[in-house]
Image (cartoon, rainbow, N blue to C red):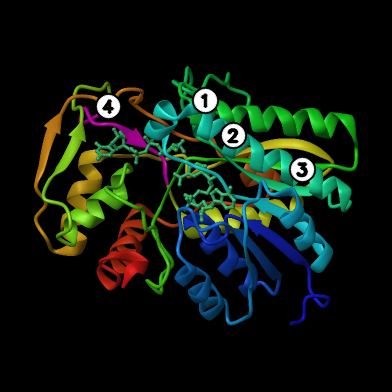
Amino acid sequence: MGFAMSRTILITGGAGYIGSHTAVALLEQGYSVVIVDNLCNSSPQAVKRIAELGRNEVAFIQADVADHEALSKVFDEYPIEAVIHFAGLKAVGESVEQPLMYYRTNLGTTMTLLEVMAEHEVWDLVFSSSATVYGDPEVLPIPEGAPTGPTNPYGRAKLMVEDICRDLAASDPRWRIALLRYFNPVGAHPSGDIGEDPTGPPNNLVPFVMQAAVGRRDKISVFGDDYNTPDGTGVRDYIHVIDLALGHLAALSHISEGCREFNLGTGTGASVLEIISATERISGNKLNYEIVGRRAGDIATSLADPTRANTELEWRADRAMETMLQDAWHWQSKNPNGFTD
Ligand code: NAD
Ligand code: UFG
């Protein structure tokens, strides 16, 4: 298998959207990859395609990351040097309805992982945080030093995990932790073989628009056109999932003692209407949309200041919005029903 030959990285939640792209990027760079995922929001098909695209074997263990015994066995079996921790639940609305499930899963997986890492003396961790920890920002673009103030249980659990990591790193200098605050990941691998495949109607804009373009959704609801933005619709800092994946590789190679937060975004934004019209052009299909009321909890604008990641991680998100939507469309049109086909 070659696991002793190259650096072995454990990816929790590696069958998911961002994890699968990161796994391929790691394989391409010669890392050995071990994935632990309970497949609660992903498909075994994704694992197969990761291995095909990365032209290498992947060790896959179907298990709950909160299961101490199962996770410990993985660390006994593979020479894991670092962990990228994606596993968790991510639907903001669902977290408002089922807060306990979100706190239990997103804190529980992380606590078990950190305990098992310490027991096996593995100290390097890259964690999937989110721009949602900033809440409604006071300054734009948002630097890492901006005040935090998440507005829902999902975001509060992310901030709690960040706090746990900061406390842990302060307690023991062996820990090296990078907290990556993602802005809005979109797009897919340029092969069109892996991509975002949400279960049920997508909550997020780009997957919804792509499903509309492929004929799976009749109408797009635009949540408000009365925001203080150029066209009145929400502006977000969309980042290509491949750039995001490469951000994890940069974090792994530049990780240093302690715990440090990094924004992963482009620093530029696009509005809801811009996304819809670009997708019409790229897909060649007319899209049906309707302006409806604002979605509870949404903000007008979210934009990253990615300077810290640019300088300290020597990383930059340089794929353009056009590429993000082209790649998302390629994935969606090649796999109209996601991994179900
Ligand atoms: P995803 O749902 O596609 O991937 C998460 C993976 O974790 C899935 O494969 C799921 O099956 C697995 N999982 C969930 N609970 C698990 C458990 N208890 N044990 C083992 N596996 C488990 O989501 P994604 O978009 O790839 O997000 C990855 C991470 O990035 C998440 O932590 C998410 O909160 C964070 N994040 C995502 C976004 C985004 O917009 N996609 C933005 C900011 C942060
Ligand atoms: N939007 C619509 N219609 C839709 C879906 C979204 O108009 O059907 C609008 C939203 O109002 C917002 C923009 O499109 O203005 C983007 O919305 P998304 O749901 O795609 O993304 P969010 O910025 O709301 O949130 C996402 C993730 C969060 C994460 C955050 C920052 O869902 O988990 O990015 O990383 F925290």
Residue on which the image places disc 1: 134
The mark closer to the camera, 3 or 4, is 3
Q: Which residue is mark 2?
A: 104
Q: Residue at x 64, y 67 (%)?
A: 26
| Residue 233 falls within the magenta-colored stretch | yes
**Horizontal placement of 123 versus 18: left or right?**
right
Q: Earlier in the sequence, mark 3 or mark 4?
A: 3
Task: Kindly report which numbered mark, 2 or 4, lies closer to the viewer in this rendering.
Answer: 2
Q: Sequence-wise, which precedes: disc 3 or disc 1?
A: 3
Mark 3 or mark 2: name the one nearer the start of the chain.
2
Q: Which residue is mark 3?
A: 114
Badge number at residue 295: 4
Residue 142 showing in the rendered view: no
Q: CA distance from mark 3 to mark 1?
A: 24 Å
**Mark 1 or mark 4, earlier in chain:** 1
Q: Secondary structure at mark 4?
A: loop
The chief SS type of the magenta part is loop
**How far across and how far down the image is residue 154, in percent?**
50, 31
Span of residues in magenta: 229-238
Are the residues tagged 3 and 1 within 8 Å (C-beta)?
no
The N terminus lies in which quarter of the figure? bottom right
Residue that appears at 13% across and 32% down: 291
